[in-house]
Amino acid sequence: MSLSNTDRQLAALLRVGALLAAVIVLLILWFLFKESWALLRQVTWTRFFTDASWHPVAGLYRITPMLSATLYATLGAVLLAAPLGIASALFNQYYAPPLLAAVYRRLIGLLAGIPSVVYGFWGLTTLAPLIGRLHPPGVSLLTGILILTLMILPTVALTVDAALAAVPVASIRSAAALGLSRWGFISGVALPTARSGLASGTLLAAGRAIGETMAVLMVAGNVAGQPHSLFDPVRTLTANIALEMAYATGDHRAALFVSGLVLMGMVLVLVGVAEWFGKERSYV
């Protein structure tokens, strides 16, 4: 099929946009590595996981406590937000009346647009004192998980909702012709068909949770120690960078850029997993 001039121009524009996006990612990686190199050439990678503590001024660069806090907070938020988001999308697509579904979808979109500092302020003034009554001090890993859950829930819900809306009409009619119940259609047709969208939404939400800074900084306690329970104050990698970059110099500054490299690596892993799910779906 021959392409019109407009199609060719649009294709060229899209190629340029895709190339530009790839170049920007490579430039970010190059910048992080360049700024980290001053420290990496004299400190082995293992030091960032085996040193006694995080005290860059004294030559100690252990990022394990912040990395653990980041992973725990992200995993906890995803474990809570993923089922809630999927259930929300299923209700919106297959159970809610059209008018209620439209209003509900707009409310979820509004939730996604709330600035992170507002979530953090609410968590600090309302949620943390409530948790503090259960187990002091209140600002803790659990508070960070709950705030992140609220922040990433709209991402999961809206992405899964779009994936479910894209289920082919032919599949819906075939299920009706076979006499499947509503739940039989959801579990046997809709969810398997939309599984790449479910995975993409969950991974996209995980990426946002990993990169969130301000809200977690406000509610997690900012203690650079290894968490041993949900009620321990913690500091994530992003919060650590935000707190210390303003006054860091020399090797301290380079160590913060190493933290940025670690975060970038985590996001690239998520992108790779999402791409794998997408390819798997295309072969089904």
Image (cartoon, grey):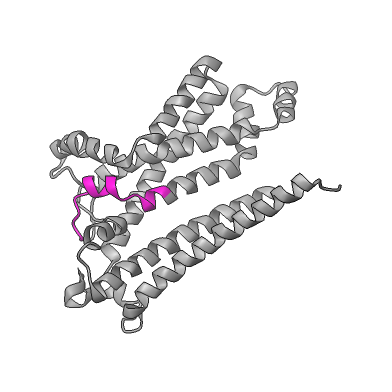
Residue 201 in percent (x, y) is at 51, 43
Q: Which residue is painted at 71% across and 51% down in the image?
A: 11
Q: Which residue is painted at 65% across and 38% down in the image?
A: 193
| Residue in the foreground of this view, choosing between 273 and 41 | 41
State whether residue 72 is above or below residue 175: below
- Rendered image quadrant of residue 37: bottom left
Q: Is residue 23 visible?
A: yes
Horizontal placement of 90 versus 43: left or right?
A: right
- Rendered image quadrant of residue 176: top right
Horizontal placement of 246 versus 68: left or right?
A: left
Horizontal placement of 190 versus 107: left or right?
A: right
| Residue in the foreground of this view, choosing between 266 and 214 | 214
State whether residue 109 is above or below residue 7: above
The span shown in magenta is: 208-224
Residue 278 in percent (x, y) is at 62, 50
| Residue in the foreground of this view, choosing between 194 and 111 | 111
Magenta region includes residue 223: yes
Residue 181 in percent (x, y) is at 63, 22
| Residue in the foreground of this view, choosing between 49 and 246 | 246
